[in-house]
Amino acid sequence: MTLSHLATEDVFVVERNDADFRAGQGMTKGLGIVFRKFRKALFGKPNSDRADTEGQFNVQYPEERLVLPEAYRNMPILLYDDATGHELCTSCFQCERICPPQVIHITQAKDPATGKPVPAAANFVLEYDTCMSCGYCAEVCPFDAIKMDHDFELSTGNHPELDVNYDRLLRPISYYEAIAPTMWSDVKEQAMKKLQNNIKRRPGAIGRDHGQKVKGGAAVAVAATPVAGAAPAAAAKPRGPVAAIGKNMPEEKVAKLISIRAANAAKRGGGDAGAAPVAEAAPIVETVVDTPAASAAPSGPVAAIGQNMSEDKRAKLEAIRAAKRAQRGE
Amino acid sequence: MNPIAIGVFIVIALLTLGSGIMVVTVRNIIHSALWLIASFIGVAALYLLMEAEFLAVVQILVYAGAVSILVLFAIMLTRQVTGEGVRVVFERWWVALLIALGLFGVIVPTLWQHGSTWEEASKLAQVGPAPVEGTAAAGLQVATATEIGRSFMGEYLLPFEVISILLLMALIGAIVIAYEERTRRRRVLTLAEELALKKRGIVEPRDAEGAVVALDSEQA
Amino acid sequence: MADALTQLGFASWLSVLIASIIKVTLILVGGSVGMMFLTWYERRAISYMQDRRGPNRVGPQGLLQPISEAIKTMTKEDATPREADRIVHFLAPVVMLGATVLSFAVIPWGRMFPVDLNAAVLFVIATGGLHSIGMMMAGWGSNNKFALLGGMRGVAQLISYEIPQVMAIIPVVLMTGSMSLQKIVEAQNDFGGLGWFVFSPVGLLGFALFFTASLAEGERTPFDIPEADSEIIAGYMTEYSGMKFAVFYLSNYMSNLAVCFITATLYLGGGNGPGVDALGGFAGGLLSLIYFLLKSFALFFIMVLIRATVPRLRVDQLMGFAWKFLLPLVLVNILSASFWVALLRWDQQWPQLTEWFGAPSTADATNWGRLAIAVVLTLLINAGAVALIMRLTNRNVQKHLYTTDEELALGLS
């Protein structure tokens, strides 16, 4: 055998101590480490920080759930306006074209009087069973009508059910705002503007009938949102992998954050500088609140995970949000 | 002897004999070895029935557990076992018959001499200190570990030592054979060795092996 | 038990038969229930060592998980390879399980002894030796090269480790003067039930050696070479499925349980502990059973801890460990055990001892001076031997890792 393919630097020969008498020290040490792990996992508190290396990592899934990141994507959904029931989709076929597995099938709506196409979809079918959750459709959509859902519990014994039609794809905007508040607030203005333009070109109930039907059928997701709103503690929980802002944050970083927060408050020029970021952040956080999946399940454990966050951590999080908003120039 | 013991004895004896016959009649040599193990275990069960517990356990430990395994190993390492079965009867079968008969001729009179019935045999064998009253072994104290140890270190010391020397010789012989074998073996460099040689840039790894082999012969 | 039945009016042979059947049933049930508990225990413990939770869904805390697993394996297909030796293939798990169950015959459950055999200690080892037959049968009968390799490895390992295992018991037998487990337990009942052998230098070393050798006998990690999943799939179990596989599994865990029981009996005082004698009777027996089980499961925890910590040995390391490390230490331990016994109670043979050290210890009065001398002497011998042997093995390892002969000869270092 040769090692010609290996550079000399690739292999490290372990340098040992000169100790003649090791007396199983390595073994004892190893056993000690494993026993500490055992003790920490059994008696320690559950791990809430990805930076931790010890403690109980398992989340007891059906009862406990991790908070999903805002940009988490599972399957595409379509949005409609809560107030009017107008769907955001204009059947521009961008998503159908870009879809790599070609699972999107759109039928364009036509004006019954003139026979001309109308910027709305008559039907929209998506094959969930073949969809690969790439999210291209959501990225390419110029009208922000198609978005990625957070609901991942889609398993079913009925296969044809996975060809989802328009009625079952539609969700109200408030639902999407609840699961991805910052992402929606980024695009909210232009999306609503475009929607208004499109509504003008839609005669009669076209582009509204599906949305209204769904709305009339009392969407489960909408009904579920208040549950989380009632739990203000849960409202403050970080979206993203549990505690995206770790407690291991170095001191100077924290100091920086505090200064940014102060600067933002000053920029806004309000007399109530101290209270402003909190007040600003509160509504966002409150609407974020909870994923529908989490609110459908008993919300206790979820809230418990959120509560693991300390006060100052929460303040930090809010400061960051405020800073972001300031950058966007609101 | 109570009827249960007699019944158990008959069953075990028949099984032992049966497996002994299977050892010499079965064509598949591995099966033959397995039958041999069964017969060893049967003998151990007979010892246990005679309340010679130590002997029974040693029989299992040494014969069923070690000797038979060595036999199996030897068969598997030296023979093509998966093929056709071996021949059961050889040309000089009568030699084997003579030896077997001779052994039988020695064993039967010896047994006869030590008493023809169970009670007599047990009385004759009872040489150790009187067994503790009330224990199961009170009636029959055939061979305890203490007794066996005493006889090895007293009456049968010479045979014991001779056997020990024989085993020692076998051990030394095995070491010598293994040692010769080892020096002739081709060295394979470890990662560290190969790397150390390569690092110095003196020789390529392939040449290094040759160098090591040359080195080995030089030392020898 | 047989006597009680005779008094109830059964014929003597019938009462013996009934008593035996009851005992056998209890042992079988106890062994297999213990094994089920053990699988759960190991899985939970190792899960926590790896920052997981382990099976906790079936039943309270997942206690019924083994039952669901048993039902699962029973309903699985029982496949036999076409070219296999069917009878041998079928008998191998039976032999394995039979050997394991036999060892449960002599295990004392606290103060309860199913059978008090004179050579009980050896009996347990001998049944362990029968395992190798089952292994060989499984390896050969499967007609599969991985199975054969696994079987060969397993048998080689079992035979090698039987030697240090048996010899590690000799100090205990010397100190007790008997091979009966009952007598061994009784001998450890001094000092208010705390006179366990493990507290003496001889017993401590013996405990470590015996436990290590038993790990190898029970094919536990780091000695699980016969069933190394990553190298030879599952060794001799490769061609087994369904119930036959479950029987192998059962026998493995039962033998591990037996090893824990025997180690607890030999070195940790069996069912002895503070308060057992004071309570006496049924309550004392119950307490002794609890002590015994606690000790055994603590030992099993150490097994699991070792499994979670140490990676599998290489075959040459395995053999080297048995012959170059365990065996010399075991021999030294026998030597120091003989010193121990000589110092503490050998006055009949050598009356000067009484002149020098005073009267030998009795059950009522301990001769502390003698005990101290014995402890110091054996401690010195054992510690010296351990240090020396570790130094020697370590030298070899270092020489190999560092500067090879070739390097030296070629002037490379």
Image: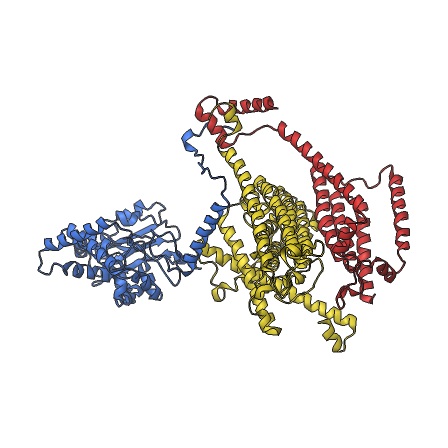
Chain for colour red: B
Colouring convention used in this rendered image of the protein: by chain
Compared across the picture, whether A155 is left or right of A254 comes to: right
Find residue C202 and report its horizontal and vertical position in percent: 59, 52
Evaluate whether residue C130 shows in this view.
Answer: yes
Q: Nearer the viewer, residue C350 or A53?
A: C350
Find residue A277 and report its horizontal and vertical position in percent: 16, 58
Evaluate whether residue B26 shows in this view.
Answer: no
> Is A129 rendered above or below residue C32?
above
Q: Nearer the viewer, residue B162 or B86?
A: B162
- Colour that chain A carries in the picture: blue
Q: Quadrant of residue A64?
A: bottom left
> Is C319 rendered above or below residue C79?
above
Find residue B77 and report its horizontal and vertical position in percent: 69, 38
- Colour that chain C carries in the picture: yellow
Q: Quadrant of residue A271?
A: bottom left
Compared across the picture, whether B95 is left or right of C53 comes to: right
